[in-house]
Amino acid sequence: MFVLPPPPPRYTIPVAYAAGAANGMAVPVVETNNTISHPDGGCPLQVGEGTYTLKDDLLLATPPPHPSEAPIINPNPLATPPTFLKGAVSAPQFGDGNPALAQPAPPAKDALKRRKPKNNIIKSSSSFVSRVITHETSAKRLSDRDPNGTFAFANINRAFQWLDITSASKEEHLTKVLFTKAHMLCHDINELTKTSSHLDIVMGSSAGDIIWYEPLSQKYARINKNGVINNSPVTHIKWLPGSENLFMASHANGVLVVYDKEKEDALFTAENTGIPERDPSQYPLEILKSVNSRNQKTNPISSWKLASQKISHFSFSPDQRHLAIVMEDGSLRLMDYLKEEVLDIFRSYYGGLICSCWSPDGKYIVTGGQDDLVTIWSFPERKIVARCQGHNSWVSSVAFDPWRCDQKTYRFGSVGDDCRLLLWDFSVGMLHRPRAHHQNSTRQRTSVVAPSSQSIRHRADSWGNRMRSDSERTENTYDDVEPLTSHPVEPRSRTALLPPIMSKVVGEDPICWLGFQKDCIMTSSLEGHIRTWNRPNDSVVKS
């Protein structure tokens, strides 16, 4: 069974209430249905390897707001793209070495069982869950489905939908969960615990609450209930690579939190009280609770404050050790999250950054944001290597196509508020070319490298990039802290410029998610269009 965690499409247009009847009673709200269309030869994508043909356009129904409250505007255009990891990964687990996080071995008879949440979401009396709509044929469709088929989970407005997008009736949801007091802004599926009979999904909401949901048993649990740990909206959420229980959530107040799905919550107070305030632009990580803390009976496992501005998105590197974090303040922050250290900071050309992704080999990071640019950064060299110009508005999602990447050439795509899908190719050799032929050919390449590798190594190994929590505090820990210097913005005239190999308007509403599969490209849009393009025959690069 393959599970695709795509599309959270966004819906930002306020929806009117159902009109009240003459006697003042509310008019019953009729749920609308998803629709699907199969365009005849519409919107092909012409690329060097062939033509990608639009297979279908699935439009998710947008439910009206709950009658008891005003419409909540979903501000987040981000998505949870599929994770593609190849080869063995030897990175230690997060929290290794802390006895307080050691998990007791389960009894032999329970070794293969997956723990499920405790509450039945269908019978729930929670005011947070408004309604659960299970399709009348769901049980039969699940028993008859292709075990190699693809599930999709999508959130739009206050609805979270579970779909089987490889079935003949893909437009008919299996389950639709409607929430009352919040919108789900992001979600992720645990690839490690996924089986034919079990799925672990976490969802982050506009209220800060997090839902752990197991759709096959219809069980759920509520984490960070009423914002007891952090009451700011969850902007992005991902399971920690290789972990059954731990997931990371970024909040709109600039805090990253690691939660354990099976631990209880407790009112959280930062462990580093008494530390003098410092300039967050120079001291980019304040550890509110360290993973090394001995206090691990309740959530959170760890909590880090990066800034006061919103964290837009973060992505894990293929080596399962590093984080690329992009923020509304326009910064890209590279972090060794196992050591709880910020390694480097880069800046956008202007405006906030919205999205990020790593190349399959972990050598490059691609970001997009409010400067209408896609930017390529070299992780080993710690420098910008190219800016990609082609969008006419904010870039909302970027993703590498691992089936068209090898050790020399890379393919990635981007989508944005200009309703465009762009594809880009670059090779290692072309990344250092000057932008124009009239540029001074004698200019050293180090002109686009802010610090030397030696200085980077010194900062990465020093205490200057973090502030420890009380759990590890020692004398003079904060007296010797050194500031971390961020790189200045490189002028466009000194940065290589990469044009797209394809640019196509694929709809009439902003595109907010992009994903590559072995046989297709998928996008989702602000108003709920999930579009699928079949790849040309034999277009996938053989590895």
Image: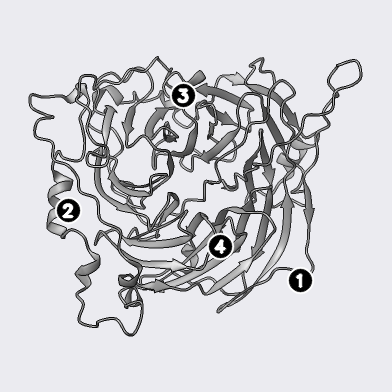
Using the numbered discs, state the Cα–Cα distance from disc 2 to disc 1 in whole angstroms.
52 Å
Residue 84 position within the rendered picture, expressed as x and y whole percent measured from the top left: 45, 54
- The circle drawn on residue 231 is 3
Label 2 or label 1, whichever lies nearer to me, is 2
Q: Does 390 appear above or below 510? A: below
Q: Residue at x 52, y 50 (%)?
A: 81
Q: Disc 4 designates what residue? A: 518
Label 2 or label 4, whichever lies nearer to me, is 2
- Label 1 crowd bin: few (<14), some (14–19), many (20+), radius 10 Å: few
- The circle drawn on residue 456 is 2
First in residue order: circle 2 vs circle 3 = 3
The answer to whether 292 appears left or right of 174 in the picture is left
- Label 2 crowd bin: few (<14), some (14–19), many (20+), radius 10 Å: some
- Residue type of the residue flagged with mark 3: Asn
Residue 76 position within the rendered picture, expressed as x and y whole percent measured from the top left: 55, 42
- Residue type of the residue flagged with mark 2: Ile
The answer to whether the residues at label 2 and label 1 have Cβ atoms under 8 Å apart is: no
The answer to whether the residues at label 1 and label 3 have Cβ atoms under 8 Å apart is: no
Q: Does 270 appear above or below 484? A: above
Q: Disc 1 designates what residue? A: 41
Using the numbered discs, state the Cα–Cα distance from disc 2 to disc 4 in whole angstroms.
37 Å
- Label 1 sits on a secondary structure element that is loop
First in residue order: circle 2 vs circle 1 = 1
